[in-house]
Image: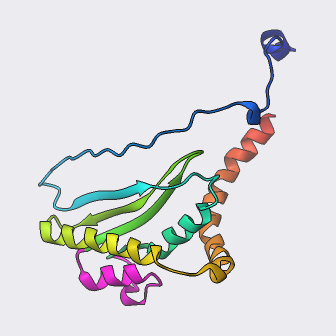
Amino acid sequence: KLAEKHFGDMKTSHISEVEYPSARYSGSTLNHRDDAMGLAHFALAVEGCSWTNPDYFALMIANTLVGSWNRAQGGGRLMPSPFARKAYEQKHPQSYMSFNTCYKDTGLWGVYGVCEPDKDALRKFIGGVQSEWRRISALQVPEKYSELRTFLKPFSLPSVMAVLPSVRISADRC
């Protein structure tokens, strides 16, 4: 009754009827140099796709193929990602993590890395990231797409499980 009293005269509409303006992606950079840190932290990203885009799963697969690596973890040359094995062999990065952040109408796809502050090491590692992206973009695997989607599902499960508690709370409030 309290809700009807305060919100009863509001017009209702379905969320599908609301039109949102398309977001415009514009790249930017923020440089902060602190030589006392001892390591260079960087992110290299490009515009990705939205979670409603048909290429969403293709980028998730590419994200999984690039993978992640940390010098402290075991495995080294036995890592499933070819780029992780290359990072282990080069010994330039301390760690890297591929990311794919999707929003309603845009996204960011890239790599976050931690590397020695040596300019040559940074140049080689960033060049390696770009080479890996070129390699993945040239892959011709449409017949294996369903197999790759199946491979991707276990990697997606933790993010889905992280959202479930908030969905449950929202459902309880309705």
Q: Nearer the viewer, residue 57 or 142?
A: 142
Q: Quadrant of residue 72?
A: bottom left
Q: How many marks?
A: 0
Counting from the top left corner in percent of width and height, residue 147 is at 66, 81
Q: From the image, which quarter does the C terminus lie in?
A: top right
Left or right? Give the position of 116 relative to 141.
left
Q: From the image, which quarter does the N terminus lie in?
A: top right
Counting from the top left corner in percent of width and height, residue 46 is at 40, 56
Residue 118 appears in the picture as rendered: no
Residue 82 within the segment the image draws in magenta = yes
Counting from the top left corner in percent of width and height, residue 61 is at 55, 71
User: In the rendered view, how is the structure colored?
Assistant: rainbow
Residue 40 within the segment the image draws in magenta = no
Q: Nearer the viewer, residue 52 or 160?
A: 52
Look at the image and give the residue range highlighted in magenta: 72-92
Residue pictured at 85% horizontal, 14% vertical? 4
**Quick one: which residue is furthest to the right in this view?**
1
Residue pictured at 49% horizontal, 59% vertical? 100
Q: Is residue 141 above or below residue 161?
A: below
Residue 169 appears in the picture as rendered: yes
Counting from the top left corner in percent of width and height, residue 63 is at 49, 68
Q: Is residue 79 above or below residue 115?
A: below
Residue pictured at 28% horizontal, 64% vertical? 114
**Quick one: which residue is furthest to the bottom in this view?**
78
Left or right? Give the position of 111 relative to 121.
right
